[in-house]
Image (tube, rainbow, N blue to C red):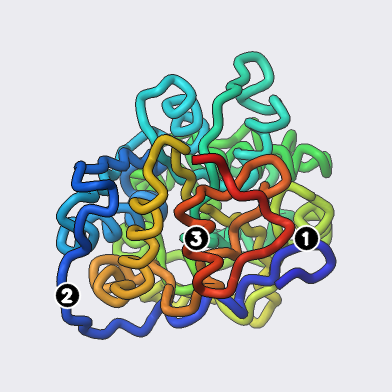
Amino acid sequence: MFENGRQTRRGVLKGTAGIGALSLAGCLGGGGGGDQVDLTVGSSSSGSSTYGNSQAIQRVVSQQSDYLNFITQDAGGDPQSIRLYADGEINSYSAGNYIMNQALTETGPFEDDPVSDFPQLGFGHLSLNLYWMALEDSDIQTTDDLAGRDVYALPASWGLRAMTEEMYGNAGLWQGLSENVVNVETTQAASALEEGRVEAFIVYTSNYTQLPSWAAEIDSRVSVRAIEMTDDYVQAAQDFAGAGYEEVDEIGGWEQDVQGGNFPKHTWTETYPYYFSPDVPADAIYDLMEICHNNYESMQEANPTILDWSDPSNFTFALTHTDEIPIHPGAADWYEENDVWDDSWTRGDE
């Protein structure tokens, strides 16, 4: 699943659009020895794709297990999730691989205030394709037109924002954008575009098919279109080791026609796994993965971004930092049983 040192994800991120009815068979009994197990899962912020995925998992886990609780926690962003775990306030979280790399290398938001306590890897749940768009009636046609224009580059607290700043900063492009970046939360993005306070913006599609709720609000309220990424911006994405790069056939997830013309749709990408404390019993994580594996269609009914987890390889695509972080023993058991264990990985201590 790797090409030129980077993950190729379309082959494993499949089937997210197919939503079917799946009967909720008998609940899983107490894999934790009869004791209740609470997973308090840092899930970026309300309205994000991570938050939506976690809520969908939470709903089905509550129906399927009589001892396991999956509790979605609005942490405010991936860096905050990592810090909440290190402070002992949550025992699980989702984090993008870019921001996790910053935490491990004590760079970015962790340079002056590093963390030293990390959980173990669980399973992948999300892939994002990021791209530029503009108001339909704007004269912005390509990324060369962005300098001096009012742009939205996602919330300042998000790992995706830090990733984008570093990517364009390395290429000498961020300085021309930063002076006119409009900093608002995602809940205000649609209004900012509708009122003309923002002319162009960065947005993403989750697992090729689904918009986060804040982008769906833009879709319903504002006419927008994709703009072409010019050579300097494409090269910045291709050269940046902190993210992936992918050219897609079309921008997915939008109700309105947003393709913007017959030009290549260049995107930069990020992938997200869940992490779990080694204090969480192995049986609990194994059972969680079994629930996802057997009931993903019910989860898709709540949130179509959920992956087709009937394919075991769809659990492993985001496991990037395996040299530094071991696999949770419950996840390791599941991977071994389903023939997707990689011998280069390390099984975590119980």
Q: Amino acid at mark 1?
A: Val
Q: Are marks 3 and 1 in contact (CB under 8 Å)?
A: no
**Mark 3 or mark 1: whose residue is earlier in sequence:** 1
- Rounded to the nearest angstrom, the CA distance separating label 1 from label 2 is 46 Å
- Closest to the observer, 70 or 182: 70
Q: Residue at x 30, y 82 (%)?
A: 19
Q: Quadrant of residue 290?
A: bottom left
**Mark 3 or mark 2: whose residue is earlier in sequence:** 2
Q: Does residue 215 appear in this view?
A: yes
Q: Is residue 316 above or below residue 115?
A: below
Q: Does residue 148 appear in this view?
A: no
Alpha-carbon neighbours of circle 3 within 10 Å: few (<14), some, or many (≥20)? some
Residue wearing tag 1: 234
Q: Residue at x 73, y 46 (%)?
A: 323
- Rounded to the nearest angstrom, the CA distance separating label 3 from label 2 is 24 Å
Q: Residue at x 49, y 40 (%)?
A: 350
Question: In which quadrant will I find the N terminus?
Answer: bottom right
Q: Amino acid at mark 2?
A: Leu
Number of labels in the image equals 3
Residue wearing tag 2: 24
Left or right for 256, reference 244: left
Q: Amino acid at mark 3?
A: Asp
Q: Position of residue 4 (x, y in %)?
A: 84, 67
Residue wearing tag 3: 333
**Mark 1 or mark 2: whose residue is earlier in sequence:** 2
> For numbered disc 2, what is the local secondary structure?
loop
